Image (tube, rainbow, N blue to C red):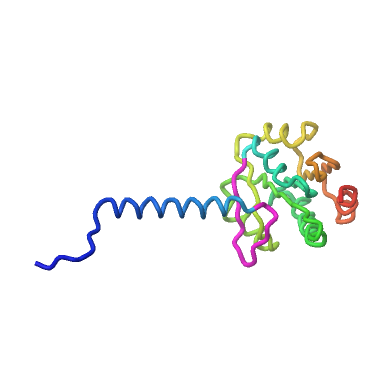
Amino acid sequence: MYRSKFRFGKNYFFTCFIAAVIIAGIRTNFMLAQIADERIPNANVVLRAIIPDTVPILIRQFIGKPVILNVWATWCKPCVEELPDLLQLQSNYSSDSVALILISADNEKILETHVRLFLQKLGVTFNSYLMSSGYDQDFIEEIDPNWTGAIPHTLFFDRAGHPSEIFNEKQTYSDFERALKKIL
């Protein structure tokens, strides 16, 4: 009977399994560490569900950078009209490391059929977020206690993470640019 020189026992397979899990964990942590404004050419739109408590944590990730947070939805005509202006603003001020955080108020049921396709059409290649359903009032209080819940709702945060300008309705590119220049 032929016997191989290499003996692969239970310990070998267990060690390989543990190594694969560690490598997968490192890769996952690296991917999760990508900040929201990082552009990845030709990447699919990454949409992550977000709960109200994580909004301040998300904003704090960008301490040292101006941050624009926009709450929008595909069914909101003013939102759809102003979103290209926000993307253009971020692009025009990319040397200033402006972070744009997009939070969709769309229903999770239309994530694939509307939200992702719309963001792809606009060329969005950075992480975007979808409000987890059932938390509407909590989101309003966490994002801006004075917010009525109407969208579009856009907040500008200075480099220290403090709100500097709040828009409760559709704005133009020049309105956004004026607000951004105050915090650059």
Residue located 78% across and 41% down the image: 161
Residue 119 sits in which quadrant? bottom right
Coordinates of residue 76 in the picture (x, y in percent): 73, 49
Residue drawn at x 25%, y 51% as measured from the top left:
10
Prevailing secondary structure of the magenta residues: loop
Residue 88, can we see it?
no
Residue at x 78%, y 60% (from the top left corner): 94
| The N terminus sits in image quarter | bottom left
Q: Position of residue 146 (x, y in %)?
A: 80, 32
Find residue 95 and report its horizontal and vertical position in percent: 80, 60
**Outermost residue, left direction?**
1
Q: Please tell me whether residue 56 is drawn above or below residue 90 in the rendered image.
A: above
Instruction: Out of 42 and 104, give the one closest to the viewer.
Output: 42
Question: Magenta region: which residues?
Answer: 35-50
Q: Is residue 24 left or right of residue 47?
A: left
Of 83 and 38, nearer the camera is 38
Apparent side of residue 3 relative to residue 156 in the rendered image (left or right): left
Is 152 on the left-hand or right-hand side of 136? right
State the residue in front, 179 or 12. 12
